[in-house]
Image (tube, grey):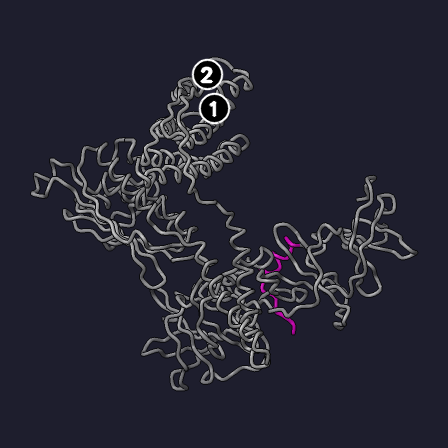
Amino acid sequence: MDQWEKELKLCFLDEAKQFLDDCEKGFLSLDSDRENPETLDKLFRLAHNLKGTSRAVGFIPISEFTHELESLLSKIKSKSIQITDETVTVLLQSNDCLRKMVSELKSNFELVFDNEELLNKIKILSSGQKLQSAIKSEAIVKETVTESHIVRGRRTVNSEESIRVNLLRLEKLNNSVGELVILQTVLSQHRHEIISPLLLKTITQLSKITKEIQDISMGLRMVPLKQTFQKLQRVVRDTAVTLNKEVELSHSGDDTEIDKTVLEYLSDPLIHIVRNAVDHGLETKFDRLQIGKSHVGKISLSAFHRGSHLVIEIQDDGKGLDVEKIKTKAIEKGLMAADEKLSNEEIYQFIFAQGFSTRTDVSEISGRGVGLDVVKTNIEKMSGEIQIETEFGKGTLFRLFFPLTLAIIEALIVAVGDATFVIPLNHVNETLRPVAKDINSITGQGDVLNLRGETLPMYRLSEILRQNGPKKSSQDSIALIVKNRKSGFAVLVDSIIRQQQVVIKQLGQEIHSHGGLVGSAILGNGRPAMILDLNELVETVFNRSPIKGVA
Amino acid sequence: MATKESAQRYLSFSLGVEEYAIPLLKVKEVIAVPETTPVPFTPTHFLGMMNLRGQVISVIDLRLKLGMPKSERTEETAVIIVDLNPIFLGVVVDSVNKVLSLEGSEVSAPPELLDAKNSDYLTGVARKDSKLILILEIAKALDVQDMEAISQTVTTKAS
């Protein structure tokens, strides 16, 4: 077995353990709340993911087992069978069984399991029948433990395993390092007061080592995409084999690094998109030859950094998206009106709607209508973006944008009165010092700013935040222009202190509920400052959407 | 409430002439009054955010929160960092007195004469060295849930 395959498998087992923890929580909550569609949805997705990834890394026993489990969950979800105590018990037993498989596979990848009895129970329940009688639950638990007949083999534990560290601990480390950097800065600023050469030398060294520690601690969260790409290679290969397609995969940018938290969200969407590309994107060998393409389909993966974003592109040379077909389906599903005029890009986005699949057959690969909606949910969860470029008959390109990290942002530090605020740079389109002739006042509406012929509502940050104190005249202020798709507005601040990267700290639950206050950051002087989302803030304070403001 | 178990330890502090105590287990540390950054849309007792070694913590003036008049800051003024799992809060008090140990039998139910509003967060009273000590349920006194509600309605900050 290759080294990478080994790593891949170990990585999967680690992940699966977490999946199963989540599943157990879900199954347990089903016990008290059987109708909760969210829980059911989540469980179904978890099972679906587990099936997919276990197949991808070649753990067939797990994949076969979860396939049955998924079918059962699917029936429960669609309400074609009722949840009973029996069902929950069997679900929990399945979870135990999977957990056992996962932990034992860790020491030997080739283990074979005999789970006939439990599988039968699942199948019986799936078919809507009841298990013969209420078997004493204790006996069942015992059974499942002995049920898995294990063939013991050579232990193949990798000594180069990585350590899983709780993210909270990392955050604490980063907090302390941040503080260290601030203290270090203070020390360096006062070095002229120090005469002792030894102390001066120590300060210089301290400053170097502090910088190093900061880099390391920030880097701790960053991991290369390599493993994820390897997983994808496997997904492509296996999917292609199952579908009897031939695929040539090329990839680049394996060493591109990204925040671990982002990567966790990113892994599932990527698998879905890639599997989708092989299954739905590429034509069958026969079809390809018919239309004069090579019988080998091409899929390329590439990753690169662009600004503060990671971009991943998944391109296939398959049949492309059929706008008309998607449109028909969308109308059928009630997602759009028959006479609605939408751009092609807007129509493509429908493929991410929940339960949207133009296929009717259920396969082990894809086609149950889960997948692409998971893609969208996960990507949006971390303020990512997905674009589709497609040409009918030529192929499709999925372009995914992710922020490199969720922990650090580039921001403007602004002053209003004696207060300091942090504004995420990507919210601000431009900054300018307004001139008198561009400022007009509309009775009952407040001030407006003329920006190259466009009239934008203009607000003072001090007024939005209800701050008292002397006000600077508009001409002495700086206007931050915030733009949305359709319109925008200007916000006046006293001055921009500087532009810098800040580490986002979550607000405690005691204050986070006000719209527009999105977090805090500790500035160079050691004082915390509020991070403001101007758009949300204006929306909340004026209780209206600024997008629909004066046009 | 008063327990029959062995003695519990409390941290006692003063607000004006009154002496209060909170369970020591809720106390993370005691610090001098730090610089705070005001937070918009919060009530007056909400002093702002502070930086506690890299962690951002909200600071609350307990006098104002309990409806007492504002007092001058003195050398004695201190901030108790309380651990209200999962959050930490800084609480400004006039002075921190000492750690005391109270037997369950020394603590009695709060007297009825206290008006209903306040008896909510007073869990008991104790007499020690002829002084009355009011035992505070700090999470209730700070009203963490309530605070969220307050910050939702935009309140003008008095300066």
Left or right of B91 in this view: B9: right
Tell me, yes or no, if residue A224 can be seen here.
Answer: yes
- The answer to if B148 sits in the magenta stretch is yes
Chain for mark 2?
A
Inspect the image, locate mark 1, and give the three-letter code of the amino acid beneath it. Val
Residue A521 lies, with reference to residue A120, above or below; the image says below
Chain for mark 1?
A
Disc 1 versus disc 2: distance between alpha carbons? 10 Å
Q: Position of residue A140 (x, y in %)?
A: 51, 18
Q: Position of residue B4 (x, y in %)?
A: 83, 39
Splitting the image into 4 quarters, where does residue A191 fall? bottom right
Of helix, strand and loop, which one carries label 1? helix
N-term-proximal mark, 1 vs 2: 1
**Is there CB contact under 8 Å for labels 1 and 2?**
yes
Which residue is under mark 1? A90
Seen from this angle, which residue lies furthest top? A132
**Residue at x 66% of width, y 67% of height:** B44
Inspect the image, locate mark 2, and give the three-letter code of the amino acid beneath it. Leu
